[in-house]
Image (spheres, rainbow, N blue to C red):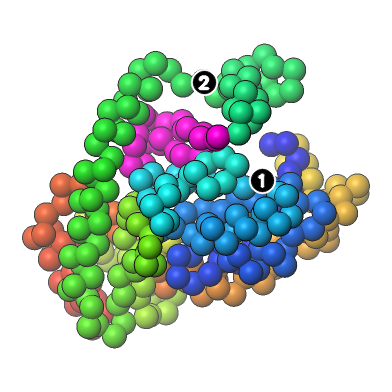
Amino acid sequence: MQNAVPVFVDIEPESLGLDPEKLEQAITPLTKAIIPVHILGYPARIQEICEVAESHNIPVIEDASHAPGASVQHKMLGTFGTMGVFSLQQRKAISTGDGGVICTDDEEVAKKLWRLRSFGDDELSYNYRMTEFAGVLGQIGLQKLGRHNKERAQAAQYLSKIFESHPRIRIRHPRPNETGVYYAVAIEVDISDASSAELVSRLEARGYPIRRVFSPLNLHPHFNPVAKPARGLPWEHPSYVGSMRGIRYENLNLPVSYKYCRGRVLELYTHPGISESQLDDFATDLLAEIN
């Protein structure tokens, strides 16, 4: 939107979040911000990411859209970076129908965000305001968040006990000193990518809210368009001299992302109110498919 050029960095295998070591290698004098994502409510290695960012004096925009209520060493996700962003879209843990929230303890950033939230500003003219009705829905959702997160965690633990001895199914959990909120339960399956697509299709046909985890973002058509859009592509502009010059996003080498995000990890939505019998049914059908 503002002619920024995304530079993708590979993930690390446990949280599926940004790898701090590879992040360090990717930073250049043109790097303006670092945007880690706490995918599926599992904390990324945010402390190490922030240490790398601080050593280069680069702001961190922490995407905690999947992780309201999650924490690392009792510090809430969304409060580590210069700012934290939370989505309030209809599928999120707190939903107002759409929109989102930005948190920051930087007074200058807060003033700027407040100024830019409504159209008509000289610097940026978009409409990012929230209605009063949406705000009330968000407050109600916030009051329920702790209970709902607890129920999701209990569902993940229940499934973990069922599959704990299975050699080809693993329920992923956060690291020690981390609290995840299981926006979706990450299930690692030791099968081929093609087989996982067939597996998910069959489970979806039986009504289970499951899908394969997000495909690596560098492969998205927005970054690899067949025809150049009217607004152009900033990384192909003659004046651009950054690390993506002359490189197609689809040709990036991101081995960990490709290993886990093309079918090896599935995401199961265990919404509040799910029963043990429903989890048993899912486990039985998954075991039948894998075995």
Q: Secondary structure at mark 2?
A: loop
- Please state the horizontal and vertical placement of residue 80, each as a whole percent of the image: 53, 48
Q: Calculate the distance from the C-alpha at mark 2 to the C-alpha at mark 1.
A: 24 Å
Q: Is residue 208 visible?
A: no
Q: Secondary structure at mark 1?
A: loop
- Please state the horizontal and vertical placement of residue 43, each as a whole percent of the image: 44, 58
Q: Is residue 98 magenta?
A: yes
How many residues crowd around disc 2 within 10 Å: few (fewer than 14), some, or many (20 or more)? few
Q: Is residue 85 left or right of residue 254?
A: left
Which residue is identified by label 1?
A: 59
Residue drawn at 51 percent across, 20 percent down: 129
Q: Amino acid at mark 1?
A: Pro
- Please state the horizontal and vertical placement of residue 281, each as a whole percent of the image: 13, 65
Q: Which mark is residue 244?
A: none
Which residue is identified by label 2?
A: 129
- Please state the horizontal and vertical placement of residue 246, each as a whole percent of the image: 83, 61
Residues in magenta, as a range: 85-105
Q: Is residue 238 visible?
A: yes
Q: Nearer the viewer, mark 2 or mark 1?
A: 1
| Quadrant placement of the C terminus | bottom left
How many residues crowd around disc 1 within 10 Å: few (fewer than 14), some, or many (20 or more)? some
Dominant SS in magenta? loop
Residue drawn at 47 percent across, 32 percent down: 101
Q: Quadrant of residue 90?
A: top left
Q: Quadrant of residue 68?
A: top left
Residue drawn at 60 percent across, 42 percent down: 82
Indicate whether 87 appears above or below 28.
above
Indicate whether 16 appears above or below 226.
below
Indicate whether 279 appears above or below 80.
below
Q: Amino acid at mark 2?
A: Arg
Residue drawn at 62 percent across, 47 percent down: 60
